[in-house]
Image (cartoon, rainbow, N blue to C red):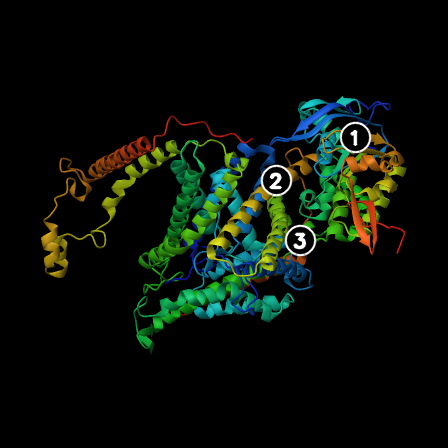
C-alpha cells in the first residue's frame, strides 16, 4: 500500500517475510539484557500480539522491528532486507522503510511534536516527499476515518488523552503503512477508547496490514490477534503459537508472570484463582 | 530578574534586541554541530526543563522561598551554547504564551539569563571542578559557579537599569525610563542576589548536580570537552589591553580620594586620613609604574604585572593545597556503567 | 530597596498566605496552565483583534508597544492605556480580567519600583507632600507616574497579543515572517513539552501535599525540591530521546516542512493604516505636549 508516487527501487518480493529475526540479542545502553536469543518470523498480513510482563523486552523488540535500535547480536530483516544503521542512512531505503512501517508509541505526548493536529498528520507524508495536494487529501481522508477532522486546527497539547491517541494513530496512518507496530496501545485509555482501538485493529485485519502489538493486557489479545508470542522475564521467547494455545496455557502464563495466583476468603471458604493485570474477573459465583 | 517592558528605553532595548540575534545564530550553529539531527527535540526538552525549573518554589530559610533560573545547571549539563538556546526559548514562551516578561525586553532578558549566566557559570564550573572531579568537588563547583553567575547576571541587569537615566532624560535631566542611577540600581540588584537569590540558585544547582552525580547519571558527562583555560587567557588578554580606557575617566573613583584631592575639594584633610595616608607607599602608584612615562602604556604594564602576581600566588596556593591533599596523578573520569 | 524582578507566576489572590510550599507551587502551576487554556478560549472569540491576520497583528501591536517607549508625556501614555482597554473590549475581553491581569503581572510591581523615585531622596525638587520623614517631590511624582503608565501600557499591548492570538497562528505568523522552520518547530515542541511537564510537576506537588503531615523544615523541603528537579531533568532528557525516535519513525531526515497558508484580507490593511495613523497622532500630540 506504500504510495510514494515514484516506482520503488526494488519492489519487495511478495513471498518475503514481513520480519525475520535470527539470534537477536540486545543490551540496554546503561547495561542489562533487553533481549536474548530471539528467533521470530512474521508473515505479511499476520496479527501478532507480543505479550510479557513489564521489563521482558517487548518495547525493545518493537523498536528493533522499526529500526530505531539495532541488535547487538543476530540480524533483523524486513521484506528481505537487513535493517542496519547503514542501510537506514541510505535515503531511498529510509523513505521506503519508514513509509512502510508505522510505529505508535506508548506515550502519545512523545509522538505529537508538531504545531497543529493537521501538521502532525501531514508530517509523515511530507517527509515521504508527497506533494501538497496529495498530502492534504490523505490528511482529510484519515482525519475523517478517525473522526478527528474537527481537531485539525488545534495544538496537540490541548487535547484529551483519547483524542491524543487518535491523533497519534492517525499521524502514522497517513503514511499508508503496510506494517503497524503498537506499543501498549491501551495504556491510559478509557474503556470506550479501548474498545474503539480494538475495533480499529480488527478493521486493519480486513485491509491486509501486518499488525504487531506489544501489550501486557491479555483481555484485548483475543479480539484482534491470531498469533501470540510470549516473552519471559529472562528476555527470551517462551511461547509462540495461536491465541488459544498460549492463552490457555495457565502454567506458561504464570511462569512468565503475566498472571498471578491470588487467594481470598468468602466466609470460611478459601478461594484461589488466577487473574491478569488488566481487568477484574468473573468467578461465576456470588 | 525578568525585565518587563517600559523600564528600558529604545536606546537600550533596540541595541540588545539586535545584539541577541547574532548570539542566537552562533549558538544554533554550534548546537547543530554537536547535536546534529537530534537538536530539535533536545533543545525543546531543555527549554521545557528550563521553563519548569523557574516554576518551582525553593525554600531558603524560615518560610521564605524563591525561584531559581537554572541557566548554570543547564550549561553544566549541555554546554553554554545549548543552554543559551534552551533558556532563550523558555523566556520567549514565557513572554508570548504565559504573558510574563516584556516583548521589547526579550533581548535584555536573554542577554542576562541566556548568555551571561550560562557562560559565566559554565566556565567557572569547569575551572573549579577541574578534570575528573569527585562528587564533593563537583557539587562545590556547581554551587560557586551558579552563585557567581547569577550575581554577575544581576549586575548586568542593574547596569542596564542604571544606564537609563544617563542615556535618556528630558532637557531638565529627568529620567524617561527606569529612574534609578547606576549607584542605586547596581548595588540593589547585586545585594538582592548576593544575599538571597544567589543562594537559591546555588542550592538548586548543587542539589540537582549532587542527585545526578550520586545516581551516576550519564547526563553529567554529556557535554563535549571544553577548553576553558584557552578562553580565560583570551579574556584576560582582552581585559589587559582594554585597561587604558581608564585614562578617559576624569577625576578619581568615588571614595578613593587621596589627601591632596580632599584638600582641594573640602579645604582640609581629616586627621585620621592624614595619619594613615603616610603608612604605605605603593610600588606602582596610580597604576602607572614610575619608570614609564606614557600613562596608557603604564596601565597595560600595570595590568600585566598585577595579573602575573595574582596568577602566580593562586598557582602557588593551589600547588600547596594539592600537595597537602596528597592527590596523585589525575584518574580518568569514571565511565557510566 | 528595589524589590526583586524574579519571575513570580500569577496565582489566585484569594488564598490564605499560610499555604504550604507544595500547595503554593501546585496552585501557581495550576493557575498558569489554566490561563493558557483560557487564552485559547479568548483567542477563539469573534472579536476585533482575533480577526486580524496574525502577522499584521503581531507587527501592529509590537509597533504600539514600541511607540509607548517614544512617547513621554503622561497624557499621551494614558491615551495609550485607554487604547489598550478599547482594543481589549473590542476583542471581547472582559475589562475586569484585563485590568486585573495587567496590574497583577506588571502594574503592581511597577508601582512598588517607582515609589522610591517619587521621593526627594531620588528626585530632588519642589516638595509636593510630606509624609513624616519622606518628602514626595512633584518632579519625582511625575517620573514615577510616567514609568508606571509606560509599563502598564506596554503590559497591556503584550497581553493583547497573547490573549487574542492562538498559539498555532502565532507560530504560523513566525514561519510566514521567514523564521527558520527548525526554530519554529523547536518552539512548538517546547510548548508541547512544557504543558506536559507542568502537569507532571503539579501532580508531584499535590502528591507531596497529600502525604505530608507537617510543613517540614526548609532543609527537608529543599532536599525534596532538588530531588524532584533532578527527576524532571532525567525525564526531560529521556523524553527527548523518545521524541527523536518518534520523529525518526515518521521519516524525519533533518527538515521540518510545513504547509502554511496565511492570507491577508482587506480588513488587515484597513487595520494597519488605522494603527499607523494612531501612532502618528500620538507622537505628534506627545511632541506638542509639555515634556516636563
Judging by the rendered image, the residue that carries numbered circle 1 is A238
Q: Which element carries disc 2, helix, strand or loop?
A: helix
As measured in the structure, the alpha-carbon distance from the residue carrying label 3 to the one carrying label 2 is 42 Å
Q: Quadrant of the C terminus of chain B?
A: top right
As measured in the structure, the alpha-carbon distance from the residue carrying label 3 to the one carrying label 1 is 63 Å
Q: Which element carries disc 3, helix, strand or loop?
A: loop
Q: Chain of mark 1?
A: A
The answer to whether the residue labelled 3 contacts the one labelled 2, judged by CB atoms less than 8 Å apart, is no
Instruction: Find residue C107 and report its horizontal and vertical position in percent.
Output: 49, 66
The answer to which quarter of the image holds residue C178 is: top right
Q: Is residue A140 left or right of residue A157?
A: right
Instruction: Find residue B130 and report its horizontal and vertical position in percent.
Output: 40, 34
Q: Chain of mark 2?
A: C
Q: Nearer the viewer, residue C185 or B117?
A: B117
Judging by the rendered image, the residue that carries numbered circle 2 is C238
The answer to whether the residue labelled 2 contacts the one labelled 1, judged by CB atoms less than 8 Å apart, is no
Residue A152 appears anywhere in the view: no
Looking at the image, is C132 positioned above or below residue C284? below
Instruction: Find residue B106 and report its horizontal and vertical position in percent.
Output: 49, 51
Q: Which element carries disc 1, helix, strand or loop?
A: strand
As measured in the structure, the alpha-carbon distance from the residue carrying label 2 to the one carrying label 1 is 30 Å
The answer to which quarter of the image holds residue C179 is: top right
Marks 3 and 2: same chain? yes
Callout 3 environment at 10 Å: few (<14), some (14 to 19), or many (20+)? few
Looking at the image, is A70 positioned above or below residue A264? above
Disc on res. C264? 3
Amino acid at each position: 500500500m506504500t504510495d510514494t508516487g515514484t516506482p520503488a527501487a526494488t519492489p519487495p518480493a511478495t513471498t518475503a517475510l514481513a520480519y525475520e529475526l535470527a539470534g537477536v540479542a540486545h543490551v540496554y545502553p546503561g547495561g542489562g539484557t533487553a533481549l536474548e536469543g530471539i528467533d521470530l518470523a512474521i508473515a505479511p498480513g499476520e496479527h501478532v500480539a507480543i505479550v510479557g510482563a513489564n521489563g521482558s523486552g517487548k518495547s525493545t523488540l518493537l523498536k528493533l522491528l522499526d529500526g530505531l535500535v539495532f541488535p547487538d547480536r543476530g540480524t533483523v530483516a524486513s521484506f528481505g532486507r537487513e535493517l542496519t544503521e547503514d542501510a537506514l542512512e541510505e535515503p531511498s531505503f529510509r523513505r521506503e522503510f519508514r513509509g512502510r512501517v508505522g510505529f505508535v508509541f506508548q506515550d502519545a505526548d512523545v509522538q505529537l511534536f508538531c504545531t497543529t493536529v493537521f501538521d502532525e498528520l501531514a508530517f509523515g507524508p511530507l517527509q515521504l516527499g508527497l506533494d501538497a495536494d496529495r498530502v492534504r487529501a490523505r490528511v482529510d481522508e484519515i482525519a475523517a476515518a478517525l473522526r478527528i477532522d474537527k481537531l485539525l486546527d488545534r495544538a496537540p497539547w490541548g487535547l484529551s488523552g483519547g483524542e491524543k491517541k487518535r491523533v497519534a494513530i492517525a499521524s502514522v496512518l497517513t503514511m499508508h503503512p503496510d506494517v503497524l507496530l503498537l506499543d501498549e496501545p491501551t495504556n491510559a485509555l478509557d474503556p470506550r477508547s479501548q474498545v474503539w482501538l480494538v475495533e480499529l485493529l480488527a478493521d486493519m485485519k480486513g485491509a491486509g496490514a501486518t499488525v504487531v502489538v506489544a501489550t501486557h493486557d491479555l483481555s484485548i489479545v483475543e479480539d484482534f490477534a491470531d498469533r501470540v508470542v510470549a516473552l519471559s522475564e529472562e528476555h527470551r521467547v517462551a511461547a509462540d503459537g495461536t491465541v488459544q494455545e498460549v492463552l490457555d496455557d495457565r502454567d506458561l502464563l504464570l511462569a512468565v508472570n503475566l498472571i498471578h495466583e491470588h487467594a481470598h476468603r468468602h466466609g470460611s471458604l478459601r478461594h484461589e484463582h488466577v487473574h491478569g493485570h488488566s481487568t477484574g474477573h468473573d468467578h461465576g459465583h456470588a | 530578574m525578568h525585565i518587563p517592558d517600559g523600564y528600558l528605553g529604545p536606546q537600550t532595548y533596540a541595541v540588545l534586541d539586535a545584539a541577541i540575534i547574532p548570539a542566537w545564530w552562533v549558538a544554533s550553529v554550534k548546537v547543530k554541530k554537536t547535536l546534529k539531527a537530534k537538536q530539535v527535540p533536545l533543545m525543546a526538552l531543555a527549554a521545557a526543563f528550563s521553563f519548569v525549573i523557574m516554576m518551582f518554589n525553593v525554600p531558603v530559610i524560615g518560610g521564605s522561598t524563591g525561584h531559581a533560573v537554572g541557566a548554570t545547571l543547564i550549561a553544566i549539563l549541555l554546554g553554554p551554547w545549548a543552554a543559551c538556546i534552551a533558556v532563550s526559548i523558555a523566556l520567549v514562551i514565557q513572554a508570548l504564551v504565559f504573558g510574563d516578561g516584556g516583548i521589547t525586553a526579550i533581548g535584555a532578558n536573554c542577554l542576562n539569563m541566556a548568555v551571561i549566566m550560562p557562560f559565566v557559570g559554565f566556565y567557572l564550573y569547569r575551572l573549579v571542578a577541574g578534570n575528573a572531579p569527585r562528587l564533593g568537588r563537583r557539587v562545590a563547583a556547581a554551587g560557586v559557579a551558579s552563585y557567581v553567575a547569577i550575581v554577575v547576571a544581576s549586575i548586568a541587569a542593574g547596569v542596564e537599569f542604571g544606564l537609563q537615566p544617563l542615556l535618556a532624560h528630558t532637557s531638565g535631566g529627568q529620567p524617561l525610563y527606569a529612574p534609578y542611577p547606576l549607584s542605586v540600581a547596581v548595588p540593589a540588584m547585586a545585594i538582592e542576589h548576593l544575599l538571597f537569590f544567589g543562594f537559591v540558585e546555588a542550592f538548586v544547582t548543587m542539589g540537582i548536580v549532587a542527585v545526578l552525580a550520586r545516581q551516576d547519571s550519564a547526563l553529567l558527562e554529556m557535554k563535549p570537552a571544553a577548553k576553558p583555560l584557552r578562553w580565560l587567557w583570551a579574556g584576560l588578554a582582552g581585559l589587559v589591553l582594554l585597561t587604558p580606557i581608564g585614562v578617559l575617566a576624569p577625576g578619581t573613583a568615588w571614595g578613593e580620594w587621596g589627601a591632596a584631592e580632599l584638600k582641594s575639594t573640602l579645604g582640609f584633610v581629616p586627621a585620621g586620613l592624614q595619619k594613615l595616608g603616610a603608612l604605605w607607599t605603593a610600588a606602582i602608584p596610580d597604576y602607572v609604574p614610575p619608570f614609564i612615562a606614557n600613562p596608557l602604556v603604564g596601565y597595560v604594564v600595570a595590568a600585566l604585572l598585577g595579573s602575573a602576581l595574582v596568577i602566580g600566588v593562586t598557582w602557588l596556593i593551589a600547588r600547596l593545597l594539592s600537595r597537602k591533599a596528597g592527590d596523585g596523578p589525575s584518574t580518568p573520569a569514571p565511565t557510566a556503567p | 530597596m528595589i524589590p526583586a524582578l524574579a519571575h513570580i507566576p500569577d496565582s489566585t489572590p484569594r488564598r490564605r498566605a499560610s499555604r504550604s510550599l507544595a500547595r503554593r507551587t501546585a496552585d501557581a502551576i495550576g493557575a498558569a496552565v489554566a490561563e493558557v487554556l483560557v487564552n485559547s478560549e479568548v483567542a477563539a472569540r469573534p472579536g476585533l483583534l482575533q480577526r486580524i491576520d496574525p502577522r499584521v497583528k503581531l507587527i501592529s501591536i509590537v509597533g504600539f508597544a514600541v511607540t509607548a517607549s517614544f512617547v513621554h508625556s503622561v497624557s499621551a501614555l494614558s491615551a495609550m492605556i485607554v487604547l489598550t482597554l478599547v482594543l481589549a473590549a473590542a476583542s471581547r475581553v472582559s475589562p475586569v480580567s484585563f485590568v486585573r491581569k495587567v496590574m497583577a503581572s506588571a502594574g503592581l510591581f511597577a508601582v512598588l519600583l517607582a515609589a522610591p523615585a517619587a521621593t526627594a531622596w531620588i528626585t530632588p525638587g519642589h516638595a509636593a507632600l510630606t509624609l513624616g520623614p519622606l518628602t514626595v517631590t512633584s518632579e519625582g511624582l511625575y517620573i514615577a507616574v510616567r514609568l508606571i503608565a509606560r509599563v502598564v501600557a506596554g503590559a497591556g499591548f503584550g497581553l493583547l497579543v497573547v490573549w487574542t492570538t492562538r498559539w498555532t497562528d502565532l507560530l504560523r505568523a513566525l514561519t510566514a515572517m521567514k523564521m527558520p522552520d527548525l526554530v519554529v518547530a523547536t518552539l512548538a515542541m517546547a510548548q508541547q513539552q512544557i504543558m506536559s511537564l507542568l502537569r507532571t510537576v503539579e501532580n508531584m506537588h499535590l502528591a507531596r501535599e497529600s502525604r505530608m503531615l507537617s510543613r517540614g523544615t526548609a532543609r527537608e523541603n529543599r532536599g525534596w525540591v532538588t530531588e524532584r528537579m533532578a527527576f524532571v531533568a532525567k525525564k526531560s532528557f529521556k523524553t527527548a530521546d523518545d521524541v527523536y525516535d518518534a520523529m525518526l519513525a515518521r521519516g524525519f531526515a533533518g527538515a521540518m516542512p510545513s504547509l502554511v497558508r496565511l492570507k491577508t484580507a482587506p480588513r488587515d490593511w484597513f487595520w494597519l493604516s488605522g494603527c499607523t495613523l494612531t501612532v502618528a497622532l500620538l507622537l505628534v500630540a506627545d511632541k506638542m505636549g509639555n515634556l516636563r
